[in-house]
Amino acid sequence: MKEYIARFGHGSAKLARQAQSKEKTLAKMERGGLTEKVVRDRVLVFRFTDVGKLPPPVLQFVEVKFGYTPDNLIYKSLDFGVDLDSRIALVGPNGAGKSTLLKLMTGDLAPLDGMVRRHNHLRIAQYHQHLADKLDLDMPALAYMMKEYPGTEEEKMRAAVGRFGLSGKAQVMPMRNLSDGQRSRVIFAWLAYRQPQLLLLDEPTNHLDIETIDSLAEALNEWDGGLVLVSHDFRLINQVAQEIWVCENQAVTRWEGDIMDFKAHLKSKAGLSD
Ligand SMILES: Nc1ncnc2c1ncn2[C@@H]1O[C@H](COP(=O)(O)OP(=O)(O)OP(=O)(O)O)[C@@H](O)[C@H]1O
């Protein structure tokens, strides 16, 4: 019954009604001592802090040329702008250069030619899975955050980590005892604490379950900053992206349609029908 409520409680109207009715029955059973109290999943507290606006363009690519070696170009000449209203999903074949584009945006990579202009006050934060590999697993999440952001009151930090669904207990045990999904949340908490205005997410859903992904989508939709997302998760893209950009053939082009059209296009290109 608990599983049913968790699965369908936020789904279609009919399923949600059925789940709500089961929830009431379950509550009665709990009150009567017939079953253990449900431990609520706290993923729905995922939340980023609003950041306010900077005048556009906050990030501008001007005739950007890039290759890891000059004889093997990944991008020939990129011209585009990203601002704090942008909600972009980068898609394209493996190895086309999506992660590379994010690194050009952050300044981790520099163009061979052309320029990337960033607004002086722009705070960018990037999520990628390798950040989890850098966590000190002997440390608890709370201690780690206190070390990363010294001078913060412990209560404030507990709340900041809690906003990403890590309970009090999970905050104080060594991170090696956390699941991959919980460690991803520590990373999200760490990124959010920097209060970025532009969030670059590179495959953020790899270790997240569907409910957490939906919660992330909800948090992103409620947040007022700019977003560039690299993901193979069409469900997340569909929920948060307003523009689809395709990285392919040494260029980035805007897809005129939504992500479902793009999915259909990929299928027909691969010779598959719906
Ligand atoms: N540090 C590096 N040095 C040299 N070549 C690299 C480096 N990082 C990536 N590449 C190459 O650059 C190309 C683009 O890589 P990138 O990771 O940006 O692609 P991607 O579109 O993000 O791929 P995927 O969807 O597989 O993650 C690939 O051919 C990759 O092998």
Image (tube, grey):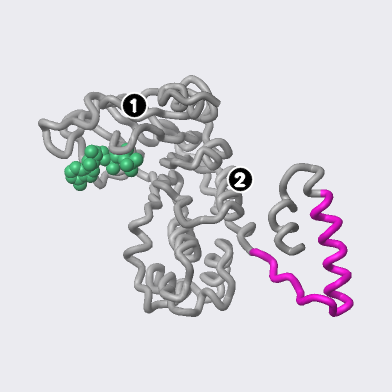
Residue 34 is situated, as x and y percent measured from the top left of the image, at 84, 77
Q: In which quarter of the image is the N terminus?
A: bottom right
Q: Nearer the viewer, residue 126 or 249?
A: 249
Three-letter amino acid code of the residue under disc 2: Glu
Coordinates of residue 120 in the picture (x, y in percent): 34, 42
Residue visible at 33% across and 57% down in the picture: 130
Residue 187 x %, y %? 43, 61
Residue 104 visible in image: no
Ligand 1, seen in the image, is in the quarter at top left
Front label number (2 vs 1): 1
Quadrant in the rendering for residue 240: top right
Q: Residue at x 36, y 68 (%)?
A: 135
Segment tinted magenta in the rendering? 17-41
Kind of residue indicated by mark 1: Val
Which residue corresponds to mark 1?
252
Instruction: Say which residue label 2 marks.
Output: 222
The reply to whether discs 2 and 1 touch (Cβ–Cβ < 8 Å) is no
Query: In the figure, is residue 107 to the left or right of 214?
Result: left
Q: What residue is rendered at 35% in x and 72% in y?
A: 136
